Image: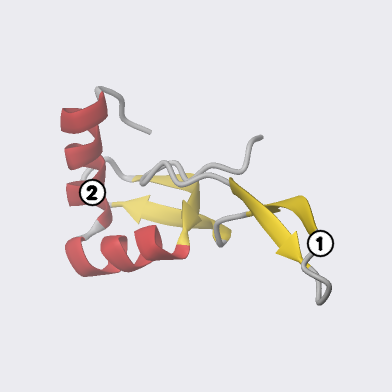
Amino acid sequence: MSRICQITGKKAITGNNVSHANNRTKRKFYPNLQVKKFYIPEEDRWITLKLSTSAIKTISKNGIYAVLKDLKKTRGYFY
């Protein structure tokens, strides 16, 4: 499974490692992803999502069902 947040769509970006001598080599910056299970009482089921920590904060603020409903409206699919 790829390192992409299932809610926000955050993924790795590229940049440079810069040494003390100012040598530059390519590197990747990965998002802070966590695997988390959520219970949806409206559907009486559990779902497992791979989320960035900012998405977890959004879910705890707005609720899992509201976030998933908004995801369905904007992207057209529902986990």
- Image quadrant in which the C terminus is located: top left
**Quarter where residue 35 is shown:** bottom right
Secondary structure beneath dot 1 equals loop
Instruction: Say left or right for 14 vs 48.
Output: right
Question: Disc 2 residue type?
Answer: Val
Q: Residue sitting at 29 percent across and 60 percent down? A: 59
Instruction: Say left or right for 13 vs 62.
Output: right
Q: Which mark is residue 67?
A: 2
Can you give x and y, in whole percent of width and height, for residue 74 in the image?
Answer: 19, 31
Q: Where does label 1 land, which residue?
A: 23
Question: Disc 1 residue type?
Answer: Asn
| Upstream in sequence: badge 2 or badge 1 | 1
Q: Is residue 43 above or below residue 59?
A: above
Q: Residue sitting at 30 percent across and 25 percent down? A: 77
Q: Residue sitting at 83 percent across and 72 percent down? A: 21
Classify mark 2: residues with Cα within 10 Å, few (<14), some (14-19) or many (20+): some
Front of the two marks 2 and 1? 1
CA–CA distance in space, label 2 to label 1: 43 Å
